[in-house]
Amino acid sequence: MNCFDFEEERIKQEIQDLGAKRVLLQLPQGLKPEATRLAKVVEEMGVFTLISADSCYGACDVAIDEAVSLGVDLIIHFGHSRFVRHEAVSTIYVEARALVNINESLEKALQLLSGYSKIGLATSVQHLHTLNETREFLVRSGKTVVIGDAGSVEHAGQVIGCDYSNVKSIVDAVEAYLFIGGGLFHALGIALSTYRPTIVVDPYDNRVFSLSETVQKLLKQHWVCIEQTRNAKNIGIIIGLKPGQKRVEAAIKVKELIEKHGKNAYLLAIREVTPEALLDFPTIDAYVNTSCPRISLDAPEKFAKPLLTVNEFMVASGEASWESMLKEGLFEK
Ligand code: SF4
């Protein structure tokens, strides 16, 4: 049985409505095992079907250039909601909602939420359909529940790795957040952009946990990277080449700032920011990452040199205080 809703009937209908003849399927890593089965479903309609085998971490990374070069007339992007607005190739988004039951996990979450009465609710796109039942459950349990709808992402209550505006918009109205979703990244983003206690319901592992200790440890690691960057003489500024990650203007501003401080700055354009790729530049002492902030969040563990976000660099350069950047969000674009 599929753990996700791939909306195959909708896909077929959209292909028919658009008259697509050549389709590119794009899936994030966790969903790729379904790619061949989905390709068969599309091919059986008499449609030429390609699977993008490249990495895909977010809807910032729609394979537009690849589709154009392959003569594709429809991209089917799975696992994310719309993020990049573009007209180059028709694109449909299949959000792939997770078909997992969260009732048992919610019961466990109540214990960790016992000290709080006003709860902010948030989730990743895979679990958006559980927000209403979660809200009702918490209200029945005596909680006040708030769901943010700041309008910058596709759905109310949704967070994506570089946009926490929904949770930030309700920060003054809540005492703690409850996040429904797998992995640590989104939940850490909530905790780090609001500095409120954040409780995670991981529906895949049926696990419930608090992030307080992890957040403190992570902030210490990042503070060390900021301190190391203060002494850096040669700094690389990373420009991501994925469609929703390309921030050339922001990179140029960082370059000017670095040079104003009498240091050397180099602009590096790259599609995939990996520890291995950065090892090719031994003369660079530290990096400022204008692409995906998620990579910087993981950086102290994986990268040989500091890889700061722009907001972290503002602290390292003395242009902004640690406190002000914590408030703005260290890991937001
Ligand atoms: S967090 Fe990174 S991978 Fe996710 S949407 Fe933002 S830029 Fe893309």
Image: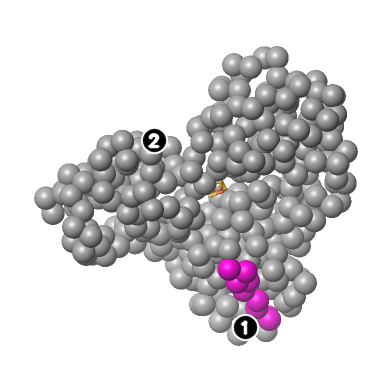
For residue 169, above or below residue 41: below
Identify which residue is drawn at 69% across, 68% down: 169
C-alpha distance separating marks 1 and 2: 43 Å
Identify which residue is drawn at 79% across, 27% down: 259
Identify which residue is drawn at 13% across, 54% down: 45
Secondary element at image label 1? helix
Which residue is identified by label 2? Answer: 54
- Is residue 288 toward the left or the right of residue 232 in the image? left
Q: Position of residue 113 (x, y in %)?
A: 70, 70
Q: Residues within 10 Å of mark 1 (few under 14, many from 20)?
A: some
Secondary element at image label 2? loop
The kind of residue tagged 2 is Asp
> Which of 75 and 139 lies nearest the eye of the viewer?
75
Which residue is identified by label 1? Answer: 139
Residue 119 sits in quarter: bottom right
Q: Is residue 26 visible?
A: yes
The kind of residue tagged 1 is Val
Quarter the N terminus occupies: bottom left
Q: Is residue 126 magenta?
A: no
Residue 5 sits in quarter: bottom left
Q: Is residue 145 magenta?
A: yes
Q: Position of residue 103 (x, y in %)?
A: 50, 71
> Which of 206 and 44 lies nearest the eye of the viewer?
44
For residue 188, above or below residue 284: below
Q: Of marks 1 and 2, which one's residue comes earlier in the chain?
A: 2
Q: Which tag is nearer the camera, tag 1 or tag 2?
A: 2
In the image, the segment drawn in magenta is: 143-151
